[in-house]
Image (cartoon, grey):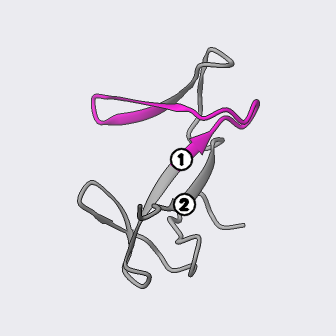
């Protein structure tokens, strides 16, 4: 398993870059979507941003979750 700080392409395992307000794999030439899940109930989390800081909130557990504990998943954006 990779370090949570690493943003790795799920297809080729190269490091993702940040382009046009989202993650991008330069090797695969595709956009990649980052989704975070609750470490306790596995529901998708809501990202809260304030004063330059980001936190995550679980609507199912009804509580804030530490970003060091969240489960991060990267998926290739499907081209319709």
Q: What residue is shown at x 59% (from left), y 19% (from top)?
A: 59
| Quarter where residue 49 is shown | top left
Image spot of residue 48 (x, y percent) = 41, 28
Residue 22 vs residue 71, the one in the foreground? 22
Q: Residues within 10 Å of mark 2 (few under 14, many from 20)?
A: few
Which of disc 2 and disc 1 is earlier in sequence? 1
Instruction: Residue 64 in the image: state x and y as whole percent.
Output: 57, 23
Q: Which part of the image, by quadrant, shows the C terminus? A: bottom left
- Numbered-mark total: 2
Q: Which residues are magenta?
A: 35-55
Q: Nearer the viewer, mark 1 or mark 2?
A: 2
Tell me what residue is drawn at x 45 percent, y 61 percent. Answer: 77
Residue 23's place in the image compared with 47, above or below, is below
Residue sticking out furthest to the bottom: 27
Which residue lies under the disc numbered 2?
75
Residue 43 location, x and y as percent?
67, 32
Helix, strand or loop status at disc 1: strand
- For residue 3, above or below residue 66: below
Magenta stretch encompasses residue 47: yes
Which residue is under mark 1? 35
Tell me what residue is drawn at x 62 percent, y 63 percent: 3
User: Among all residues in the image, which is located at the extreme left?
Assistant: 20
Assess whether residue 42 is covered by the magenta stretch: yes
């Amino acid at each position: 398993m990779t370090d949570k700080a690493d943003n790795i392409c799920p297809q080729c395992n190269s490091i993702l870059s940040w382009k046009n307000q989202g993650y991008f794999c330069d090797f695969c030439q595709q956009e990649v979507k980052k989704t975070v899940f609750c470490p306790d109930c596995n529901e998708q989390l809501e990202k809260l941003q304030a004063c330059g800081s980001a936190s995550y909130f679980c609507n199912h557990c009804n509580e804030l979750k530490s970003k060091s504990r969240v489960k991060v998943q990267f998926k290739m954006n499907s081209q319709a």
